[in-house]
Amino acid sequence: MPVSPAYRPEPRFFDLGADYGDAVKAADFPQTILRLRNDRAAAQVGLETLSDAEWLAHFGRFEPLPGQPGPVAMRYHGHQFRVYNPDIGDGRGFLAAQMREVSGAQAASDSALPGRLLDLGTKGSGQTPWSRHADGRLTLKGGMREALAAAMLDSLGVPTCRILSLIETGENLERHDEPSPTRAAVMVRLSHSHIRFGTFQRAAYYGRKDQIEALMEHARSLYHPAVAPGDAAGFLAAVVEASAALTAKWIAAGFVHGVLNTDNLNVTGESFDYGPWRFLPHYEPGFTAAYFDQNGLYAFARQPEAVFWNLTQLAGCLKLIADAEPQVAVLTEALNGFGPAYIRHLRAAFLNRLGVQSLGEAADQRLLDATLALAREKKEALRWEPIFFDWFGGFSSAARALGGVRGKTYQGEAFDAFRFALMEHEPDRPERLEHPMFAAPEPEEMLIDEVEALWSAIDTADDWAPLQAKLARLEAAKKAWRL
């Protein structure tokens, strides 16, 4: 059956014109084998009613959805490991469609607002003008890993894209960093904007103040409508706030993005484009996800620094459209709001992960500091995720935590400080502890050994059942955390 009546196409990026993207065609794949179909995400934009044949047509062969003009490879530049690269852009993906979120799909507090504008973006859909002699393809393992990263982050309440579709394409790819030949796939993500910091950098690189102004007004009106038209500092402040919240939630989730280049951060503060990501096995500030990040530039604890550095590049672009010194000063003030916003969001993120209510800045900071101290002292015996699982709901979980598999770990000076700080805070919605997930001895995690085991089942036996089961458990965990 076709798209549902709730489907509302609104391809607004295309209004910007040819200076911002290039019309492209998807590769003609030998096969289109449906591997993952995320109907929960599809229902957000009225696409869950598509038949499998229609799904393959739209997300494997990329026949345009109703009301959509066809794919466009977005133009952008970026600092990659702080080295400017003017030769990048959508090299193996494109913006396939934009549509409004179905009414009621957003948070209840926003139910009176129109649905968010969401993008369908691809990865592995073939060569574009920005492929730089690469094949424009995605490995099946890479697509599987992106689906897992997005599902885990979503379960923990981190703003993230959702992987809508994963289709195997029947090609064999040669890659230098994994066993080859390896299977190929094309992926579609549902995301709240693909306008990157690097999209602004490209306009700035060419000295096009008109393009910066047009892009800012486009992004402001669609994603930060509370900001007044033409208010560059207000727009920057909104992006800073969203980016600070995202970074804090990454830290609380123990997530390491791996490649925090300016083309991998967007104006809505939603995480996307997952490559060499990892989740912390235990507390380790210097933990890196990418084998090529030899200097630890994007290590776990350096992620706030990396995001702030990238925001500084965005501010530099917006400075070009600030005509007077007072406007530049306001931009600087907006940029410098990142530090206080990050700390505020970090306290809130840790309280949320522990399922307790705020008691004020001082008490909340004590709990944050005590949690990190416990994780640091016990890192050889205590993994990151179980801390929040065991003590979710605050001290009302003491019997569960102390009587569980890690009970003997919870002792010593650091634990005493954590216990006292936790006791200050009342549980937030303690009825959530009644969910069956909290009766299990272990939380849902996403450590590298499990990721490799899930891939091995697919690679050696074409067995997708373990992956599907993992995704289902993560969806159940999402409900448990937020019930």
Image (spheres, grey):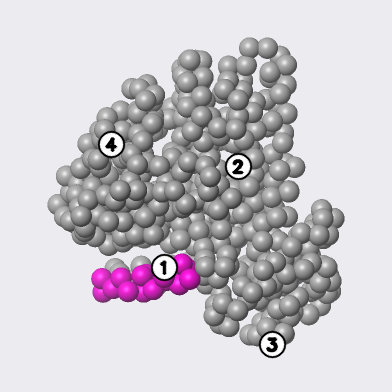
Residue at 24% x, 55% y is 50
The one of 1 and 123 positioned closer to us in this rendering: 1
Sequence order check: which comes first, mark 2 or mark 3?
2
Is 9 left, or right, of 482 in this rendering? left
Residue marked by disc 2: 242
- State how far apart marks 2 and 3 are (Cα): 39 Å
Q: Quadrant of residue 43?
A: bottom left
* Crowding at mark 1 (Cα within 10 Å: few <14, some 14-19, many 20+): some
Question: Is residue 414 at least partly visible in the picture?
Answer: no
The one of 474 and 256 positioned closer to us in this rendering: 474
Question: Is residue 272 one of those drawn in magenta?
Answer: no
Magenta-drawn segment:
460-476
Is 470 left, or right, of 344 in this rendering? left
Q: Which three-letter amino acid code belongs to the residue tagged 1? A: Leu
- State how far apart marks 2 and 4 are (Cα): 29 Å
Residue furthest to the left in view is 30
For the residues bearing labels 2 and 3, Cβ distance under 8 angstroms: no
**Disc nearest the viewer among 3 and 4:** 4
Q: Which three-letter amino acid code belongs to the residue tagged 4? A: Gln
Question: Is residue 464 one of those drawn in magenta?
Answer: yes
Mark linked to residue 403: 3
Q: Position of residue 178 (x, y in %)?
A: 35, 58
Question: Is residue 63 at least partly visible in the picture?
Answer: yes
For the residues bearing labels 3 and 1, Cβ distance under 8 angstroms: no
